[in-house]
Each structure stands twice: as structure tokens, then as C-alpha cells.
Amino acid sequence: MRTEWTMGQKIRGQNQRAKQAGARYDLTLEQWLETLEYFNHKCAYCGKRDYEFIEHYLPVRVAGTTVSNCVPSCASCNALKDAQNHKLTLYQSERVLAFLESKGVKIAFHIHEYKATKEEHVILYCEGCRNRIDVPGLLPDEAELYIEQYFSNTGYAYQV
């Protein structure tokens, strides 16, 4: 049987996650209620569906559980944002960035610019951050189209 957690318990749980990760953990119930009001109790990313999760904008291990790193998220946007090699479109939401800036946080982005190199098979390599992705079976002639199709606007967000 699944027990429904109260909002206070959810916040304490998220603060505990940050503490265990060695990150800052000071989100309060009052701050979270203000955040929900700011986003009208809807998902901060899509603005359409009711929120279901306390979403960490940047990973909890990086920026902790704080008022300047937590926004409401629906299950769909939460899953999209957590996907490996996700697109930065969700990170670049103007509403979310305006909220974070109102809390004193400035976010910058690194967009991966992959180039294909050939060793034993094609490797995608970002010169900016040195991220490498091995792609066995990808032909060198198909690499540019593959990068354009699957890796446009990918990268990560970080605090400045």
C-alpha cells in the first residue's frame, strides 16, 4: 500500500537527499508555497499540467535543495529533463530562468558541438567540454546527419 506524503514530508525528503549528496539543503515549506504560487501550481516547464514533483533545476549534487534550485514539475517534463542526452529546451524556459534570476541565480549553458572522428568506429567529440560518445556501427558519411538529428541543442546548464 502506497502512503501519500504531505508537502512538508516531501520537502524534508528532498532536503535529506541534498544533505546526503553533500550539497546545500535549506528549502522551507514557506519558500516552496511561494514557488508554487509563482507558477500557479502548474509545471514550471510546460505550464499546462498540475505539478507532481519538486524538481531540481540543476542536479541535487550540484546545487542542492534550495529555493533557487527547486521548481514544480509534471511527470512528463520531469522524465524528459532526466533523460540522458536531453535537449536543453526545458532548461532554457524563460519562465523558469526569470524565477531563478529573481532568487539571485544566473544560469549559463554549454551547448555541445559534436564533431565526428574515426578510430575503430565513429566517436562524437565535443571540443568545448571534451565529452565523447562512442557510436559503433555509425558510418562516417552519416555522422553529420546523425549529430544534427539527435544532438542539436544538447549540453548542460550551470550556475555562473
Image (cartoon, rainbow, N blue to C red):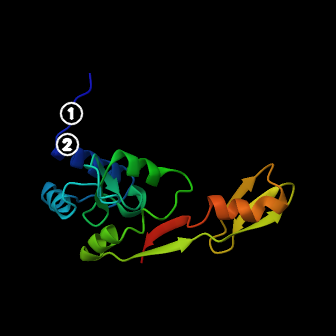
Task: Indicate left or right for 50 with 97 as reference.
Answer: left
Name which of mark 2 and mark 1 comes first in the sequence.
1
Q: Which quadrant holds residue 154? A: bottom right
The local secondary structure at tag 1 comes to: loop
Q: Going by the picture, which residue comes out furthest to the front? A: 48
Coordinates of residue 119 in the picture (x, y in percent): 86, 60
Residue found farthest to the left = 30
Tag shown at residue 9: 2
Q: Residue at x 18, y 59 (%)?
A: 40
Residue 12 locus on image (x, y percent): 22, 47
Foreground of the two, 82 or 42: 42
Query: In the rendered structure, are the residues bearing label 2 and label 1 in contact, judged by CB atoms less than 8 Å apart?
Result: no
Classify mark 2: helix, strand or loop: helix
Mark number for residue 145? none
Question: Label 2 vs label 1: CA separation?
Answer: 10 Å
Q: Picture coordinates of residue 21 (x, y %)? A: 39, 53
Name the kind of residue labelled 1 in the image.
Answer: Glu
Q: Residue at x 17, y 45 (%)?
A: 7
| Residue at 28 percent of width and 67 percent of height | 68
Between residue 23 and residue 49, name the one nearer to us: 49
Residue beneath disc 1: 4
